[in-house]
Image (cartoon, rainbow, N blue to C red):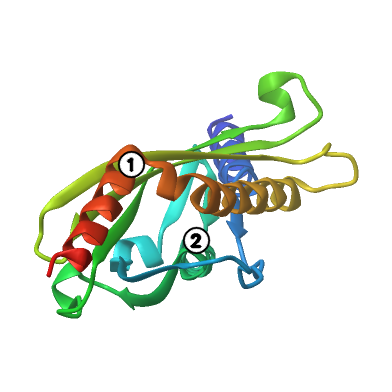
Amino acid sequence: MHRTTTRTAALMLMLGLLTACSSTTSVVIDQGFPNVVYEPRDYRAALVFPPEFRSYQARPVEGTFIDMGPAQVELLGKAFRGLFTEVDVLTARAEAHPDTDIIIEPSVLEVQLSTPSDSYLNVYEVWIKYNLELETAGGEPIDTWFMPAYGKTPDSFMLSRTEAIEEATVVALRDAGAKLLLDFFRIPSVYAWMERQQDMQVVP
């Protein structure tokens, strides 16, 4: 009887471990993004991607990991190259060139995931909440800009969980790039900063 109980407990433990392993989803975002065709403003920007941003791995829910660091570095780098004539990609603000006009350091505040079992809809949804610290080369704060991005699959039909999460995340990243191109220079504090830059250039 004791042996049977021991074997049953061991089998249950193994089953639990296998279930835990099978419920883990690891997603790697390796989608490439095209270069941006836009009309950049004549400024030199320092785009700061710290190591933790470059290797960022989201954990939106228990057992789900989204490796999106390299993808977001590529996407944001290309978006900002569409906004400024010159962009230096750095790992720390202290590396900024003396002729830099603006320093931009993005960070991820949160990544959220909704699956068909959560929403009762046949789609996967991903929300990425970015924070952009903006300052002058002299360290004067310009703004802290909150930028949410959203992506979803058209439906989850014929997609595995991993494929669906990857697709929704790629759409969210593209949404972030589109928002940058459309809204960055509309930020009131950024617009005011550009006005000051222009005033400084015309002063004799």
Single out the mark in the foreground, 1 or 2. 1
Q: Is residue 90 left or right of residue 36?
A: left
Q: Secondary structure at mark 2?
A: helix
Q: Position of residue 151 (x, y in %)?
A: 65, 41
Q: Residue at x 75, y 19 (%)?
A: 120
Q: Residue at x 29, y 59 (%)?
A: 104
Hey, what amino acid is under mark 1?
Answer: Trp
Mark 1: few/some/many CA within 10 Å (<14, 14-19, 20+): some
* Residue position for label 2: 72
Q: Position of residue 82 (x, y in %)?
A: 52, 67
* Residue position for label 1: 145
The image quadrant of residue 28 is bottom right
What is the residue that sits farthest to the front in this orientation?
204
User: In which quadrant is the N terminus drawn?
Assistant: top right
Hey, what amino acid is under mark 2?
Answer: Gln
Q: Which of these two is toward me, 39 or 169?
A: 39
Q: Is residue 134 above or below residue 115?
A: below
Q: Which of these two is toward me, 23 or 97?
A: 97
Q: Is residue 95 left or right of residue 9?
A: left
